[in-house]
Image (cartoon, rainbow, N blue to C red):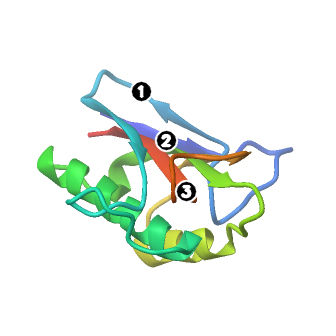
Amino acid sequence: MSVRHINPDGLHRSPAFSQAVVVEQPAKTIYIGGQNGVDADGKVVGPTVGEQARQAFRNLATILESEGASLANIVHWTIAVVDGHSFDEGVAAFQEVWNRDDPPPAITVHVVAGLGPGFLVEIDAVAVV
């Protein structure tokens, strides 16, 4: 399997995301549903975007590890953050979990009117193993 992160000339190049990710051959693909900042008991872990984003990333890692993968296998994130809340803490949480030596995934961020009660952030992902 071959995975290429592309940032074509003429487009902005960011250390935080790739413009696109190309999977060259058939591979195991894991589609992860939206993960919120909830613990194993389903309780919201804290009142801030940062706390909830860190937990959502831990949840993603747990799912991937159950399939023999890691966060490095993620090729695309979709992140939703509730309007009125700064996503700076979420970016900081991403930087804590993402190995800077790995090419960053393609990322889409949406500011939304609301999520479930108490939820400030939700992250879904696609991983290729």
Extreme top residue here? 26
Q: Amino acid at mark 3?
A: Val
Label 3 or label 1, whichever lies nearer to me, is: 3
Q: Earlier in the sequence, mark 2 or mark 1?
A: 2
Expressed as whole percent of the image width and height from the top left, the position of residue 43 reads 32, 62
Expressed as whole percent of the image width and height from the top left, the position of residue 108 reads 65, 44
65 on left or right of 108: left
The answer to which of 19 and 34 lies nearer the viewer is 34
Query: Residue at the location (75% across, 55% down)?
Result: 83
Label 2 or label 3, whichever lies nearer to me, is: 3
The answer to which of 88 and 52 lies nearer the viewer is 52
Mark 2 and mark 1: span between their CA atoms?
A: 8 Å
The N terminus, quarter of image: top left
Query: Residue at the location (73% across, 69% down)?
Result: 86
Please, is residue 73 above or below residue 21 in the view?
Answer: below
Q: Amino acid at mark 1?
A: Glu
8 on left or right of 25: right
Q: Earlier in the sequence, mark 3 or mark 1?
A: 1
The C terminus, quarter of image: top left
Expressed as whole percent of the image width and height from the top left, the position of residue 20 reads 61, 39
- Which residue is under mark 1? 24
**Could you tell me how many numbered marks the image carries?**
3
- Which residue is under mark 3? 121
Q: Marks 2 and 1: CB-CB under 8 Å?
A: yes
Judged from the image, the secondary structure of the residue bearing numbered disc 3 is strand
- Which residue is under mark 2? 4
Q: How many residues crowd around disc 3 within 10 Å: few (fewer than 14), some, or many (20 or more)?
A: many
Query: Residue at the location (48% across, 66% down)?
Result: 53
106 on left or right of 64: right
Q: How many residues crowd around disc 2 within 10 Å: few (fewer than 14), some, or many (20 or more)?
A: few
Expressed as whole percent of the image width and height from the top left, the position of residue 99 reads 42, 71
- Mark number for residue 2? none
